[in-house]
Amino acid sequence: MQLLSFRTGDEVSFGALIEGRVVDLGRHLPEYDSLRALLEANGIVRALDTAAEVSPDYRLDKVDLLAPLPDAARLLCVFDDARDEPVSVDPKFIRGHGRPLRLPEGDTKPVAAGVAVAVSTTHEDMAVLGFCLLTYLSPALLAAGPWLTTPEALPGDQTFSLRVQVDDQSAELELPVPGESALALAGERSLESGDMIAFLHYLPDLKAGAGSRIELDCPPLGTLLSPVEEQPPEDATGGNPS
């Protein structure tokens, strides 16, 4: 199952992707005010049943995708298998699919790419809630999406084949499915349900600057597009205004 957070006009909601269309679970399950709230309440089965019973509400191209868990409290980033030193990143900076990452004019940054894992810690046994793609340029310049794919929707393979494209250059990565590693770190760092751990690999030969287009593609997880734009002079934070 693919779960996502999205905006239509001024309204923010969450839903399930069914054959290219979106079921608005926020409308059909109003007792949950976000995808994180649904996951915290162990509502995956309810979401599956609801998505199967109702007609889709929107075409995918008619909604603006947000980061899958825009209200995640914590994000840990693990770089190049250095699992003993994860970096804590403020999730408020995570952008969704198609939303621009903004760099000062003339600045370039190497791309790091990989897979983020959302975890559940509300029950006696910790569990993986889902996986999504993540692009990282800096702690204030990162994107996740396009949606959260739940474990039962994955094929039986033990690796993710990830293609990273930056303008006319590309790289191929074979990444182990990081479920067990994520759960171990979640226990060590006392993460809560809906928090995320990203396992990232730096690609120093792939550099992005204003005008670049970064695309991550992994068939089980979808395609995450991040255009890079010039940072407006008034944006002193270096981050990503919504």
Image (tube, rainbow, N blue to C red):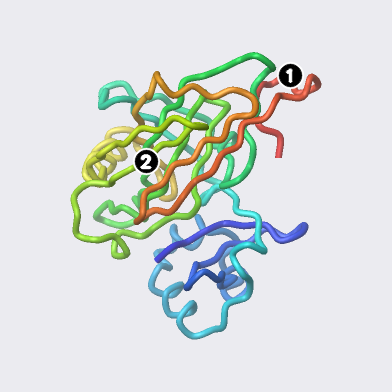
Q: Nearer the viewer, mark 1 or mark 2?
A: 2
**Is 2 or 85 nearer to us in this picture?**
2
Q: Is residue 186 above or below residue 131?
A: above
Q: Residues within 10 Å of mark 1 (few under 14, many from 20)?
A: few
Q: Is residue 164 left or right of residue 138?
A: left
Q: Quadrant of residue 95?
A: top right
Q: Is residue 127 left or right of residue 14?
A: left
**Is 171 or 2 nearer to us in this picture?**
171
Q: Is residue 118 above or below residue 167?
A: below
Q: Residues within 10 Å of mark 2 (few under 14, many from 20)?
A: some
Residue 31 in percent (x, y) is at 58, 70
Q: Residue furthest right?
A: 234
C-alpha separation, residue under disc 1 versus residue under disc 2? 33 Å
Residue to which mark 1 is pinned? 236
Q: Quadrant of residue 212?
A: top right
**Is 112 or 128 nearer to us in this picture?**
112
Residue occupying image coordinates x 34% and y 25%: 79
Residue occupying image coordinates x 77% and y 57%: 10
Q: Amino acid at mark 2?
A: Arg
Q: Amino acid at mark 1?
A: Ala
